Image (tube, grey):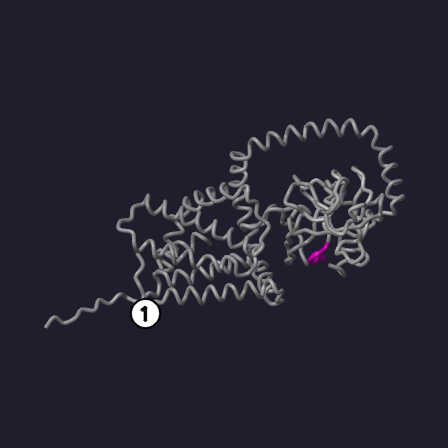
Amino acid sequence: MAAPRPAERPRHTLLILAAAALTLLTLQFRGVEPLDAFQQGVRDILSPVRSVVDRVTDPVRTVWDGIFDYGDLRGENERLQTELARMRGESLTAEADDELLERLLGEVDIAYTDLETVVVRILGTPPGNFTTHIVEIDKGSDDGLAEGQPVVTGAGLVGRLEQVDRARSIVRLATHPDFRVGVRLVDSQDEGLARGTGDQDVLVLDAGIRADASVSVGEVVTTSGGRSLFPADIPVGRVSDSDNDTEFRRTIVVELAAGLENLSFLNVVIGAPGLGEGR
Amino acid sequence: MLLVTILAGIHGGPERGALVAFWAGLLYDSITTAPLGLHALVFPSIAMAVSSLERRMLRNTLVTDALGVAAAVATGSAAVVAVGEIFGQASFDPGTLGERILISALLTTAVAAPVNRVVAWAAAAGLPVTIELRRDQN
């Protein structure tokens, strides 16, 4: 049992602490630079400790996952077996597909494969309570990464760097509710702003697009570039619902080309014309 | 950090508990993706509430202590999520809220015993000796 201290004024103390915390939150949301630097410094100092803790607790986490995610793992195994069988069949036509892809990229003038990238490994979900739709990767500013850089796989856009420390970074996935990307519909050349919805593998294009734009299901969607943070012509996905019948506000659903589940490695785009100039 | 907060409230009293909780929250904010000040805003209230309830308890047993810690962790986790929602923290899946709160309460309670000793030792250090003042009856 705690011994009460003389002249304790817990309510006053609580008010002062709440005011201090609210002040810090306000400064943080207003983007005061020293606070970000402070957080980054603390994370950099504690990074070796976290690596050791991760290594020590890894067997425990594996056992935990084995017990509680057994059903998921079994389902995943079956899915991968099916996928493997499908890919074996498809490999027979791979050469023809490659030719087709090159022709398509040539037709839409996509220079996606020429972008300078850094390969990074996914470490998992970062610690904390607010970690849905973000992942932690094993490289940081020491490897040339910077906040805002696009993150892709061979299939297309995955997200962008949200937080960059010296040796680790946080990627905000495209499905994050706060994720925004300027996109272009390749056939119609209409442009708009797509956003994450919190749903798996889906973006919604509902801003900047004309209500009478001619959009077809299956149409390829790429980044639009321009004033966007993202360079132009990174594949985003395909239209899965064109919402052609709307009379007021168009909501086009885009299925992401890059599956965001079970990722192991990613590419961070570090060299692209105009990268980081926009918002 | 939430466990340290709760135990600091129990062993350090409301004021000291709130101060420890504030710094624990600030450290937690610094190493996670949460905005600086979010956990520091919530944790002191939790410490103070736990301290206040603990003082009102007539009898403590191991079971009531464990249940108290589990309830405090669950409340603290829910409070963090609620305050996070107010401050626009979208990176939280509401579908898994109950599950996450339950698991964190159970796991945290399971490791509470060894942490309790450390926090009790740390919280008691430097506290002034209680002096009993008696009025002269004559």
Magenta segment, principal secondary structure?
Answer: loop
The residue depicted at 34 percent of the width and 54 percent of the height is B53
The residue depicted at 57 percent of the width and 48 percent of the height is B92
Which of the 4 quarters of the picture holds residue A237? top right
What segment is highlighted magenta in the picture?
A142-149
The residue depicted at 42 percent of the width and 58 percent of the height is B45
Drawn side of residue A173 relative to residue A108, left or right: left
Residue A260, percent from left and from top: 68, 42
Which corner quadrant holds the C terminus of chain A? Answer: bottom right
Which corner quadrant holds the N terminus of chain A? Answer: bottom left
Which of the 4 quarters of the picture holds residue B56? bottom left
- Vertical order, A26 against B78 (above or below): below
Mark 1 Cα shell of 10 Å, populated few (<14), some (14-19), many (≥20): few
Drawn side of residue A20 relative to residue A254, left or right: left
Drawn side of residue B77 relative to residue A136, left or right: left
Amino acid type at image mark 1? Ala
Residue B19, percent from left and from top: 42, 63
Asked whether A45 or A83 is in front, the reply is A83
Given the image, what chain letter belongs to the residue carrying mark 1? A
Residue A164, percent from left and from top: 65, 57
Q: Which residue is mark 1?
A: A7
Residue A139, percent from left and from top: 67, 53
Magenta span has A148? Answer: yes
The residue depicted at 34 percent of the width and 67 percent of the height is A8
Q: Is residue B116 visible?
A: yes
